């Protein structure tokens, strides 16, 4: 059984660290002025990975807050994965050449499947697929649209095409601190046999324990609001899943 990894989350908007409620850009809380300083705190607490999202990029379809992710990748002893606004091969190459470890492709898996397949063939495991689901169906464009494609079908198809890592977010849970949708996440892990990272709704150390113990092999969890609101510390979380 591979290690269960924690990914503290830094969502960037206007150069600041923010959290949105269920992806709603009108329900934003600012938690810090510097993504780099936040990442440094997480790295010092023992994080092996940082999960970064360019919210401005996700909405506009182009890189906006990329310099923060690059600085973290270059200056801190931590692995970085980034999503948001990555729509072209130039975007992917930019991040990977600048030291980011993994690039997350989300909306493009629906809007431009040929591009995603090409990136998987070119960069392999350095590409993660972000699957954001609303009632089991894939949502795109910063969660503004819901497609007619089932999350499980998309994951199965892309795992057959070489995807090794999936980040699964249940939008109804995101930012709510109501607990993750362990059933859906576990289903995806069991179906694909790949590294599936849980995202959305994690509110307690017990949630992390449940995910880690799931027999279908969930690979890790992204933690955002629970850390920012002091539900538990990253040190406590790392100790819990050790």
Image (spheres, helix red, strand yellow):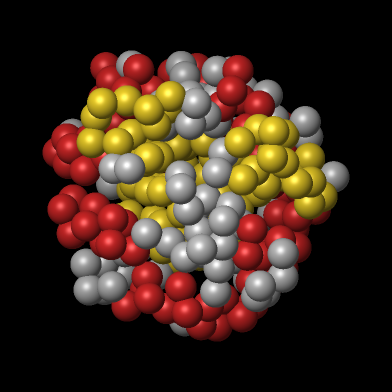
Q: Quadrant of residue 145?
A: top left
Residue closer to the observer: 113 or 72: 113
Q: Quadrant of residue 154?
A: top left
Quadrant of the snapshot with the N terminus: bottom left
Q: Please state if 176 lies on the left or on the right of 179 as rendered.
A: right
Residue 114, image x and y in percent?
27, 17
Q: Residue at x 28, y 55 (%)?
A: 184
Residue 143, image x and y in percent?
48, 31
From where the camera sits, is residue 238 visible? Answer: no
Q: Residue at x 65, y 75 (%)?
A: 232
From where the camera sits, is residue 178 visible? Answer: yes
Residue 207, image x and y in percent?
46, 73
Residue 149, image x and y in percent?
24, 29
Residue closer to the observer: 79 or 241: 241
Quick check: 13 above or below 31?
A: above
Q: Residue at x 33, y 34 (%)?
A: 138
- How many badges with numbers are in the image? 0
Q: Please state if 16 lies on the left or on the right of 205 as rendered.
A: right
Q: Residue at x 31, y 69 (%)?
A: 2
Residue closer to the observer: 159 or 206: 206
Of all residues, the one furthest to the right in this rendering is 33
């Amino acid at each position: 059984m591979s290690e269960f990894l924690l990914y503290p989350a830094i969502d960037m908007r206007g150069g600041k660290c923010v959290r949105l409620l269920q992806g709603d850009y009108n329900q934003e809380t600012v938690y810090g002025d510097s993504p780099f300083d936040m990442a440094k705190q997480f790295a010092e607490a023992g994080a092996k990975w940082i999960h970064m999202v360019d919210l401005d990029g996700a909405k506009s379809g182009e890189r906006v807050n990329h310099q923060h992710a690059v600085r973290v990748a270059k200056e801190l002893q931590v692995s970085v994965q980034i999503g948001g606004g990555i729509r072209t091969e130039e975007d992917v190459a930019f991040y990977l050449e600048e030291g980011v470890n993994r690039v997350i492709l989300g909306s493009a898996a629906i809007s431009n499947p040929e591009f995603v397949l090409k990136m998987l063939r070119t960069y392999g495991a350095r590409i993660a697929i972000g699957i954001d689901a609303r009632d089991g169906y894939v949502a795109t464009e910063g969660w503004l649209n819901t497609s007619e494609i089932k999350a499980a079908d998309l994951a199965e198809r892309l795992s057959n095409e070489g995807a090794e890592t999936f980040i699964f977010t249940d939008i109804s849970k995101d930012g709510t601190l109501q607990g993750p949708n362990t059933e859906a996440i576990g289903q995806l892990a069991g179906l694909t046999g790949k590294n599936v990272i849980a995202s959305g709704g994690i509110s307690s150390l017990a949630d992390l324990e449940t995910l880690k113990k799931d027999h279908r092999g969930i690979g890790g969890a992204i933690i955002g609001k629970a850390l920012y609101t002091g539900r538990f510390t990253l040190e406590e979380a790392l100790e819990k899943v050790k």
